[in-house]
């Protein structure tokens, strides 16, 4: 009798949060939740926050790894994107989710340590790049395992934000900012 093993992988992009860097500049980040029973992933459940520029970085990295492969597109950058526009935020989240769902279906990309760091660690872009190239005192597995525990501090990109945080809650017809 032949036994088949069923692997599941669920990715959800949700909970947009507005971060104010300084007086006139703000950006959104999004929670990425992953749940899986796949042996490809170090953690079976994880939750990290990423912003648009980090998705762009990930796609660029994956493109370098898979030069001849078609990569899914990210939602297009919009110079008129408004964090207060519910439809724009929802469309972007949907685009991020579709991008990630497509990427994790491609075995070659699934072997890229930067994808795993992006999905399961809270490291900045700079630290992910250094870790993936072996230029840190910790391994990719250690970075993922310690994520969220404060063991590896976020020194570059993200820690420089002494910012006010606002959470969005979408009602049926409105967007609430806290």
Image (spheres, rainbow, N blue to C red):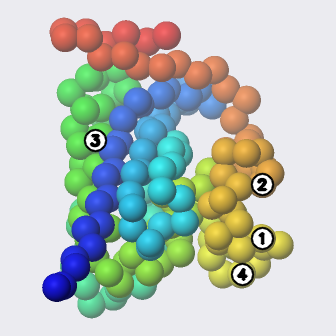
Reply above or below: 85 against 132: above
x and y percent of residue 49 in the render? 52, 43
Q: Where residue 92 is drawn, which disc sits there? A: 3
Compared with 63, 26 (above or below) is above
Q: Is residue 153 left or right of residue 140?
A: right
Give the x, y percent position of residue 8.
Answer: 29, 60
Label 4 vs label 3, nearer the camera: 4
The quadrant the N terminus occupies is bottom left
Give the foreground label among 3 and 1: 1
Q: Can residue 113 be seen in the rendering of this structure?
A: yes
* Nearer-the-camera pick, 3 or 92: 3
The residue indicated by pointer 2 is 152
Q: Which residue matches tag 1? A: 138
The residues bearing labels 4 and 3 have C-alpha atoms spaced at a distance of 33 Å
Which of the pair 108/61 is nearer the observer? 108
Q: Residues within 10 Å of mark 1 (few under 14, many from 20)?
A: few
Question: Which badge, 2 or 3, is on the more N-terminal residue?
Answer: 3
Visible residue check, residue 50: no
- For label 4, the SS is loop
Residue at (26%, 23%) from the top-left corner?
86
* Separation of residues labelled 3 and 1 (CA atoms): 33 Å
Q: Earlier in the sequence, mark 4 or mark 2?
A: 4
Classify mark 3: residues with Cα within 10 Å, few (<14), some (14-19) or many (20+).
Answer: many
Measure how far apart labels 4 and 2 are at the Cα level.
15 Å
Mark 3 / mark 1, whichever is N-terminal: 3
User: Which residue bears the numbered disc 4?
Assistant: 134
């Amino acid at each position: 009798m032949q036994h088949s093993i069923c692997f599941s992988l669920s990715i959800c992009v949700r909970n947009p949060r507005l971060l104010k860097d300084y007086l006139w500049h703000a950006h959104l980040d999004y929670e990425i939740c992953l749940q899986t029973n796949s042996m490809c992933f170090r953690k079976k459940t994880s939750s990290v926050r990423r912003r648009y520029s980090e998705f762009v970085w990930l796609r660029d990295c994956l493109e370098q790894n898979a030069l001849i492969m078609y990569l899914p597109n990210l939602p297009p950058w919009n110079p008129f994107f408004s964090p207060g526009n519910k439809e724009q935020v929802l469309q972007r989240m949907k685009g991020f989710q579709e991008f990630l769902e497509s990427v994790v279906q491609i075995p070659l990309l699934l072997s890229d340590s930067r994808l795993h760091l992006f999905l399961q660690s809270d490291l900045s872009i700079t630290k992910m790049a250094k870790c993936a190239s072996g230029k840190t005192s910790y391994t990719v597995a250690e970075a993922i395992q310690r994520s969220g525990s404060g063991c590896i501090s976020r020194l570059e990109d993200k820690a420089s934000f002494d910012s006010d945080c606002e959470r969005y809650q979408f009602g049926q017809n409105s967007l609430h900012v806290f």
